[in-house]
Amino acid sequence: MIRLFRVFIPTSVVALLISEVILVLACYSAASLFTLYQDPLFYLFAEGNYWKILFVTGCIILGLYFQDLYTDLRIAARIVLVQQVCLAVGSSLLIMAFLGYLNPELLLGRWLMIVGSFGVIVLLPLWRLFYWKYIVAGFRFERVLLLGNSSILGEVISRLVEKPEFGYSILGYLSEGEPCDFPIPCLGRLEDVRKVWEFYKPTRIVVGMAERRNRLPVQDLLEIRFGGVIIEDAADTYEIAMRRVCSRKIQPSQLIFSSMLGPRPHAIAIQNFYSFLIGVMGLMAFSPFMLITAIAVELSSPGPVLYRQRRVGLNGAIFTLYKFRSMYVDAEARTGAVWASVDDPRITPIGRWLRRLRLDELPQFWNVVMGDMAIVGPRPERPEFVEFLTHQIPYYRQ
């Protein structure tokens, strides 16, 4: 597990990302050997075309990232994986075509792009399948023993079982009382922790007891800890597995006395600068997609192309968020403000595709440029939902 910018990233995901960057670069570099009538090294380096291949590679990797292919490494269906790779490659080709229209010198050779893209479409899904089947299992180097029966521990178990890329191999758990219905073996009770540790040799112990007072085997855990085993609270493992803080375990004093919270002027200035820069670049790079999407929305159903919605931003500021319309006009006239659901009848046929491909979100680059939103940050919700979420999620407004 690697921690980058306070975010835990599985080592297997980092390794996959690096390997796929190398693979895509290799495909386009190899294509130059077969499609050019001049020395490929001279073409790539002396003429400065290597950065164009780097740019295409970056576009493809971003396309994969935006389709959550680095969030969940599991392969649900091979045909879906091929479709996602084709979409990422096709998007990069459209971006290069648009840049070439602005300046023909930005284009790579036609056959180089065709052969290189074909290589990526063929080899990248095959590499993904191989990586998932044979390599991800090798990252399970953390042998984990769990202590307790708490609901938080149950969530952690479910997450780690379905996410082998986190590198945790769960040995089992020790029950506080009667064994519960966790999908892992019960290895005994809390008082057996020393015996279980000596037999199974875990490298990490996660404590998730519903009640610790006078029940936590302190002396045994101290000896195990000084034996080199990592012992952590289930809330910390929850943050790694769920990629969010366990708000149920946060005490007000932690927020009051924490030196890590609170806006820093220089950090805000840097964030505003790169958000503005990326917003402008996003509007320029995705303008062809936005034009095609606008035409599709206009032809699909009567109503405006853009949908305007009030959202709550930083410090409760209300702003207007822009999206391509994916629902019928007056879709909430009867239901009022409700969250979208699977097979939502309010969504237009073209709107389903827009939401699946995230194209309906592209106008939000304008909100980023205007300073209403940042590229990275919490999702701005509607005012109607903020009050509900405030009562459901501790410290939601903070």
Image: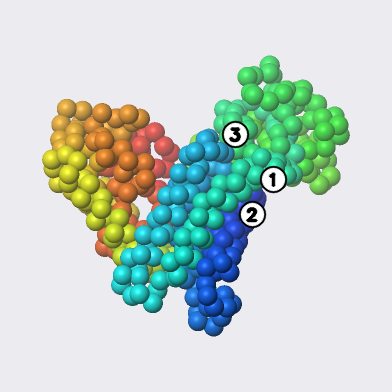
Q: CA distance from mark 1 to mark 3?
A: 16 Å
Mark 1 — residue? 135
Marks 2 and 1, how far apart at CA: 10 Å
Mark 3 → mark 2, Cα distance in angstroms: 19 Å
> On the image, numbered disc 3 is attached to which residue?
162
Work out whether residue 329 or residue 177 is closer to the camera in this orientation and state it: 329
Numbered badge on residue 191? none
311 to the left or right of 358: left
Foreground label between 1 and 3: 1
Task: Name the foreground residue: 346 vs 96.
Answer: 96
- Residue in the image at 52% along x and 61% along y: 116
Point out the residue furthest to the top here.
Answer: 178
Secondary structure under badge 1? helix
- Residue under the point 49% across and 38% down: 79
Q: Position of residue 240 (x, y in %)?
A: 59, 44
Tag on residue 15?
2
What residue is at 64 percent from the left and 49 percent from the top?
12
How many marks the image carries: the answer is 3
Q: Residue 277: name its quadrant.
A: bottom left
- Of the residues under marks 2 and 1, which one precedes in the sequence? 2
Q: Amino acid at mark 3?
A: Glu
Crowdedness of circle 3 by 10 Å Cα count: few (<14), some, many (20+)?
few
